[in-house]
Amino acid sequence: MPDTAPPDIATPDTATLATRTAADIRRDWIDRREVALLDAREEGPYSLAHPLFAVSVPLSRVELLAYDLLPRRDVPVTVYDNGEGYAEPTARRLQALGYRDVTLLEGGLAGWTAAGFEVYRDVNVPSKAFGEWVEHHRHTPSLSADEVKTLVDTGADLVILDARRYEEFQTMAIPGGTSVPGAELVKRVHDIAPDPRTMVVVNCAGRTRSIIGTQSLVNAGIPNRVAALRNGTIGWTLAGLELDRGRDGRFPAVSPEGDAKGRKAARAVADRAGVGRIGPAALDAFRGDERRTLHLFDVRTPEEYEAGHLPGFRHAAGGQLVQATDEYVAVRGARIVLADDPAGGGGPRADMTASWLAQLGWEVHVLEGDVASLGHESGPDRRRLPPVPDAGAETVAPRDLLALLENGEVAVIDITRSPRYRAGHIPGAYFSTRARLGGTIARLPKGVRPVLTCWDGTLTRYAAADFPPGAFPLLLEGGTQGWVAAGLPLSAGLERLGPEPDDVYKRPYEGTDNSAAAMQGYIDWELELVDQLKRDGAHNFRVI
């Protein structure tokens, strides 16, 4: 185990793990065979260098991610790190969760680069690289921030449609824009811009969703002139222009006529992309196919999903599923089925999303027909989690913890993700990733018992099993959320943050405090991705 593991951690099965070479993995990608390549490091190091289709599954969060990302237990899974010692314990943990074909990448990340294969920076790279690939091959039309600002100032007939999630739109938006997340564009544009003389400008924070959103409308054949806002809100900011903050501005309801136009146009695009169409009987056959990994996604808005959805379908708003496929699917070569209209399965959002996933190299199908026999559920999407080990750890109620803290008997270690810790934590709590608990515990005053917390208490229950009997920490009941519910205060002080956290990559296109150099560097990186893909040659991207 790495020296960052908890002290005296119980030793896992010591049988030697098999390895796979970088060439084996790359060959599987090219031949479209199912394989998952997992990076066991935290997201920060992962964002600095990783193979194209590698997915971030840190040792700290395996149980929270595995069952959603890897629904088939005998899928081939290969794990790597860059010499930090996280890969093997991650592989052992996956085996303990029931995965039967787990190997290590021979030589780790260094072995991949030594084989002469490409590594990439940033996160959600397959989707971002694909967006650049689309623009390169289709010459997706775009306008600079200054050109769009001039159109606005001169009263031109145009609409600005923001293709990001609504939460991102509220954080910062182009003045006068309307929130229309990517998969909603073709469904709703006929009502938002019914006059073909109205120009449609699509923006996101950077480039990818602007490009994909604009090309979606071009592919759908709308009569309006369409253009992406080049470089999105980053380009707007770098041009010295002001953004709106905290705005409402969601898309209006769709009319029957607009919906019919969107359905017809989206279906034609999906057919051109080679999207499959299945009914309930074929879905049952897919579910019974033990040789293939199957992902089921409902691509509507979160509100629609919560109001009612088909059982077994996870929520993944279509634009985000295209933008961040690796956050939903870890198995390259997996089979994907999309649902939209809960009465009939299919719909323009499923068709447009599927059209892009097919071009990204996935086998994708749209569920349609009479789906009533499949049943109905309501409520938000929930993570699929493995059973919590019965580690025998004790719990402590929030107000009892307060008394123990006042007496100096315990110290709280918060293993939530660092942005949430920064936003507010139990006063005096130490921050730690789960994989680095050993180093954090060593910093505690002698004789003080550790108390583990995270936001909702889920991760701490898994982390308790990392400790041998007799050395269990206390677990805070209900996590920090329970502390807040008990009326106890949070602190934003970072005096016990420790080394600068690397568990979350700070995206230069999110938030409002990014430097101009970071934003420009991000745009420059995106523009280099086409050349990297050409050198790579293992992506199987195609553009209709």
Image (cartoon, rainbow, N blue to C red):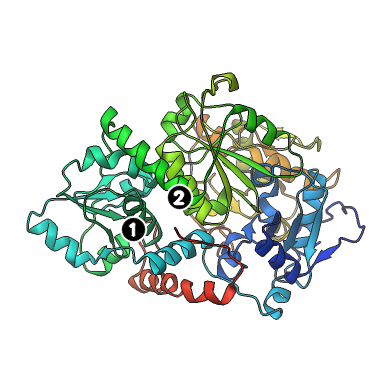
Query: Which numbered tag is attached to residue 272?
Result: 2
Looking at the picture, tell me which residue is in the foreground, 371 or 494: 371
Which residue was labeled with disc 1? 512
The answer to the question of whether label 1 and label 2 lie on touching residues, with beta carbons closer than 8 A, is no
Please say whether residue 499 is visible from this viewpoint.
no
Side (left or right) of 443 relative to 304: right
Looking at the picture, tell me which residue is in the foreground, 467 or 204: 204
Side (left or right) of 421 relative to 174: right
Residue 40 location (% of width, % of height): 69, 60
Quarter of the image that includes the C terminus: bottom left
Query: Which numbered tag is attached to residue 427?
Result: none
Q: Would you place residue 102 above or below residue 499 in this image?
A: above
Residue 543 location (% of width, % of height): 46, 60
Residue 493 location (% of width, % of height): 48, 53
Q: Would you place residue 249 above or below residue 127 in this image?
A: above
Q: Residue furthest left?
A: 154
Quarter of the image that includes the N terminus: bottom right
**Measuring 78% from the left and 43% from the top, which residue is drawn there?**
97
Residue 12 location (% of width, % of height): 87, 53
**Measuring 48% from the left and 51% from the top, which residue is drawn there?**
273
State the SS at label 2.
helix
Camera-near label (1 vs 2) is: 2
State the SS at label 1.
loop
**Measuring 71% from the left and 78% from the top, which residue is drawn there?**
115
Q: Would you place residue 123 above or below residue 402 in this image?
A: below
**Residue type at tag 2:** Arg
Please say whether residue 280 is visible from this viewpoint.
yes
Q: CA distance from mark 1 to mark 2?
A: 39 Å
Q: Would you place residue 411 above or below residue 42 in this image?
A: above
**Residue type at tag 1:** Thr
Looking at the picture, tell me which residue is in the foreground, 406 or 272: 272
Lower sequence index among marks 1 and 2: 2
